[in-house]
Image: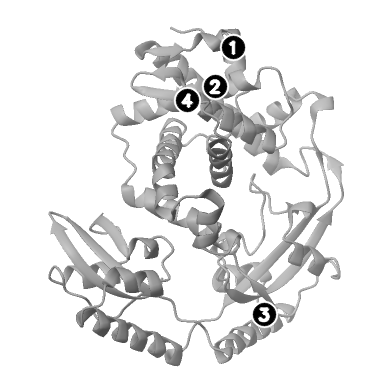
Amino acid sequence: MKRQNRMKHLKYLIISLFITLLITGHAQESQGIVIDKIIAKVDDYIILKSELERAYLDFLARGQARVSNAKCEILQQLVVNKMLVAQAEIDSIIVLEAEVNSNLDRRMAVMIQQFGGESEIQKAYGKSIEQIKSEIFDNIKEQLTIQRMQSELTADMKVTPAEVRKFFKEIPRDSLPYFSTEVSIAQIVKQAEPGPSQKEKVRNLLLDIKSRIERGESFATLAKQYSQDPGSASRGGELGFYGRGELAPEYEAAALSLSPGEISMPVETQFGFHIIELEEKRGNTYRTRHILIIPKPSQADYDKAKDYLHRLRTKIVNDSITFQAAAKENSDDQETASAGGFFHDEAGALRVSAEQLDPNIFFTIDTMRIGSITNPLRFQQADGTYAFRIIYYKDKIKPHQANIDDDYQKIATAALSRKQNLKISEWFEKARNNVFIDIDSEYDYCKLTNP
């Protein structure tokens, strides 16, 4: 029973923040501290002391309260994670290398933007980009495997309104969270699309680069100089092996039409324009390298996007179309478009804390009337490019203590999370008897009894 109670309260997030992992590892190396040792074994999988310490630091960094058994609960979760990985192997649940690389490339793109370039990252950590990526590749693969195995165990789980109300009634009154000011706001984003003249400039540049390679210049050197693919540029454009259907169809079709060593004409995909060299075919897989250049919109292209939003706003104001319908049909921001343009919190509720808003949006709505819609506003997107958007300020919710009427979606998400945790806990109690688990005696005080 004590073990089940502990499991019910295990809410530690599996994926430690990427930047935290890097900073922690760098700090330990720069200080010459060696804290690694094996503290737990789960069949063929091990847990290092450094893993536990990083997870605990992340737990504290997220503002969690210091509780006496926090490390024990985190260690227990790490054990569960290793068991999930082991079970995924038994059940043949596979995470493709392409998925891991895609996830890794997205994280690196964020890092590059935050640091201002690859060279700044390398200076900060004293390692090459390739070394950094190599060190965390296995961690990301494990994280994705755990997520997939958890999804398998909790697939199709839902909570009924009755379960949500029961869950809410079980929360002690003095434990109900207090929510700060929240706002209900939506946006329609329009990105400037590069016109024909801009695309032609990129095609001509790639044709020139292709000619230089064919005259003897190094593909790898030119990829590092010109390619705008943050994941492969530093590797000289190398993408490695991919199976059919894993890359953009236009890219795959062009690559497979080549002979090994041959370089394609410029190929357009959703990512931009590429020249591709086929390096090797092996069964149903193939290895390529490429140089990607992304056309930049001209001022005329930006003006066109702005005018589009002006016309769309007029239709909304004149009640020709609702904001929500216009967002679903026209917004280029997929995350908010599917919700009718509305920003939503982690629970899926269509409102967000004012404190967590992007500063630009916060100061914009601070000057708006509830129910109003802005004119098109230029803003910088996460990838550093610019776009236009119109913002709809629907409502403002005052600070309040959680209640079933105003916060149903948040409460429903918490209820579902508990139900899923209980499911995984039940699975763990059954599965743990079929694997070898050994915990270092240093953590005897946790009373994580071995089977």
From the viewer's perspective, tell me whether residue 153 is left or right of residue 253: right
* Disc 1 + disc 2, Cβ < 8 Å: yes
Q: Nearer the viewer, mark 3 or mark 4?
A: 4
Tell me what residue is drawn at x 38 percent, y 69 percent. Answer: 224
Residue 8 at least partly seen: no
Label located before the other in sequence (1 or 4): 4
Label located before the other in sequence (1 or 2): 2
Name the residue carrying label 4: 48
Q: Distance between the residues labelled 2 and 3?
A: 57 Å
Secondary structure of residue under mark 3: loop
Image quarter of the N terminus: top right
Q: Which of marks 2 and 3 is in front?
A: 2
Name the residue carrying label 1: 446
Q: Mark on residue 75?
A: 2
Q: Which amino acid does label 4 sit on?
A: Leu
Q: Which of marks 2 and 4 is in front?
A: 4
